[in-house]
Amino acid sequence: MYKDLKLNFWWHGMKRDVAHSVAKCLVCQQVKAEHQRIAERTIQILDDMLRACMRDFHKSWEDHLYLVEFAYNNSLQESIGMTTFAALYGRKCCSSLSWDDVGEREIFKPELIDKSVDVVRIIWE
Ligand SMILES: [Zn+2]
């Protein structure tokens, strides 16, 4: 709220005044609580996915982090009815297997794609 207000207004002690006003406002407190609930849920989901990755892939778990990110980005969030990636960027998330620039494209063997799909399935479960 302060960042939005300071685009058009400024007075001495403005930040403190906004903080006091927000602290007393029931709607602002409800929005803040909802944001905290979503943040805690996101952290819990990522924690679960990383633990599953470490459990299933042992010493090579770090090699699969990009697939954890892909799996998270493509997980349907029931509260918003879409994936977090689609909510943020307005489009589907692509696998990092195709994050190359034109002219840099490597041809991936079908086995690598099948293995990646299997890993994402394991992370989701
Ligand atoms: Zn408010």
Image: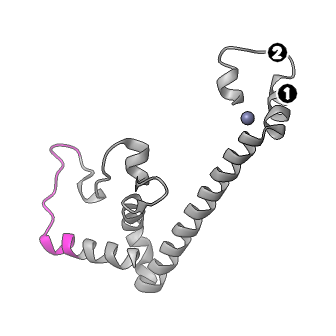
* Mark 2 crowdedness (10 Å alpha carbons): few <14, some 14-19, many ≥20: few
Is the C terminus in the top left, top right, bottom left or bottom right quadrant?
bottom left
Whether 21 is drawn above or below 110: the answer is above
Per the image, label 2 sits on a secondary structure element best described as loop
In the image, is 22 to the left or to the right of 53?
right
In the image, is 108 to the left or to the right of 118?
left
Q: Is residue 110 magenta?
A: yes
Magenta stretch, residue numbers: 101-114
Is the N terminus in the top left, top right, bottom left or bottom right quadrant?
top right
Ligand 1 has an atom within 8 Å of the beta carbon of the residue at disc 1: no
Q: Name the residue beneath numbered marker 2.
A: 11
Residue 72 percent across, percent down from the top left:
42, 63
Question: Which is the main secondary structure of the residues drawn in magenta?
Answer: loop
Q: For residue 26, what is the image quadrant?
A: top right
* Mark 1 crowdedness (10 Å alpha carbons): few <14, some 14-19, many ≥20: few
Q: For residue 31, what is the image quadrant?
A: top right
Which amino acid is tagged 1?
Answer: Asp
Whether 26 is drawn above or below 6: the answer is below
Which amino acid is tagged 2?
Answer: Trp
Which of these two is toward me, 105 or 19? 19
Residue 35 percent across, percent down from the top left:
63, 50
In the image, is 36 to the left or to the right of 17?
left
- Give the mark count: 2
Whether 50 is drawn above or below 88: the answer is below
Residue 110 percent across, percent down from the top left:
13, 71
Q: Name the residue beneath numbered marker 1.
A: 17
Q: For residue 94, what is the image quadrant?
A: bottom left
